[in-house]
Image: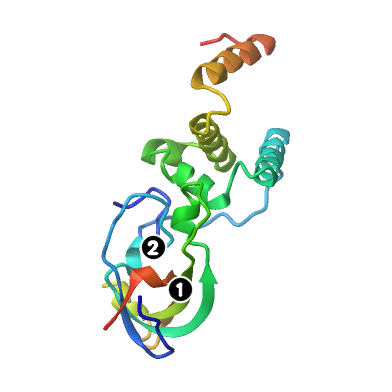
Amino acid sequence: MRGPHDLGGLPAGPVDTQPHEMTFWEKQIDALNLLLAQKGLRKVDENRRYIEMLGDDAYNTLSYYERWTAALARQLIDKGLFTQDEVDAKVVEIRGRLGEDAG
Amino acid sequence: MAEFSRGDHVRVRDDYPPGHIRTPVYVRGKEGVVQRKFGSFANPEVLALGRDGMPAKLLYEVRFRQKDLWPDYDGSDGDTLDIDIYEHWLAKI
């Protein structure tokens, strides 16, 4: 089976090599990843596996750091650090705080 | 598992297991030549499961002819690609 990340030899457009500014939340995810690695809760290869398991749709739709975030959440749920229910509740709480519809 | 030396002709396993695999699909089943041995490293396929990556695996640099990798390759016959592959993905020809 070929994962969505394994693109070698497939038709593709040009690669955008322009550097881009990181947003604050992207920096937060980067920092979170480093902290979790320091605490032995995360390995690069493990994170890669979770990113590759997101499925073709999610992999091709999400941005780079959105993939990292989705994979990390799944990984930490599997490790028992928190539950999917807790993530869902937190999302509702934050949407409420930001004044969005909790849909 | 047999160790390989520089110049050994090898074939990459034509296998598609689940999990985190560092051997790209486009070299699986292809024939190449060992260039050098980098040493042994924790196995990323095992690290990816949250474990320690042991037993460690030897990592080799293997050279492929571009014409062997891409059926429609229209560059020079001499064009090659060097890629790092772990020992358990290689068999001596």
Q: Is residue A103 above or below residue A56?
A: above
**The one of B88 and B25 positioned closer to us in this rendering:** B88
Residue position marked by numbered label 2 in the rendering? B24
Disc 2/disc 1 C-alpha distance (Å): 9 Å
Residue at image position (61%, 41%) is A41
- At label 1, counting other C-alpha atoms closer than 10 Å, the crowd grade (few under 14, some 14-19, many 20 or more) is some
Identify the colour scheme used.
Answer: rainbow
Kindly identify which numbered label has been placed on residue B83.
Answer: 1
x and y percent of residue A68 in the render? Answer: 56, 40
Q: Nearer the viewer, residue A40 or B19?
A: A40
Q: Chain of mark 1?
A: B
> Against A90, is A52 above or below?
below
The residue lying at 56 percent from left, 24 percent from top is A82
Point out which mark residue B58 bears.
none
Asked whether, in this view, residue B84 is left or right of residue B14, the answer is right
| Circle 2 SS class | loop
Query: In the current view of this chain or complex, which residue is farthest to the front?
Result: B55
* Badge 2 vs badge 1, beta-carbon distance below 8 Å: yes
Q: Position of residue B71 (x, y in %)?
A: 26, 73
Query: Within 10 Å of the Cα at label 2, are there few (<14), some (14-19), or many (20+) other Cα atoms?
Result: some
Name the residue type under label 2: Pro
Taking the spot 54% from the left edge, 39% from the top edge, the residue there is A63
* Chain letter of the residue beneath label 2 in the structure image: B
Which residue sits furthest bottom? B7
Please name whichever residue, A23 or A97, is drawn nearer the observer in this view of the structure: A97
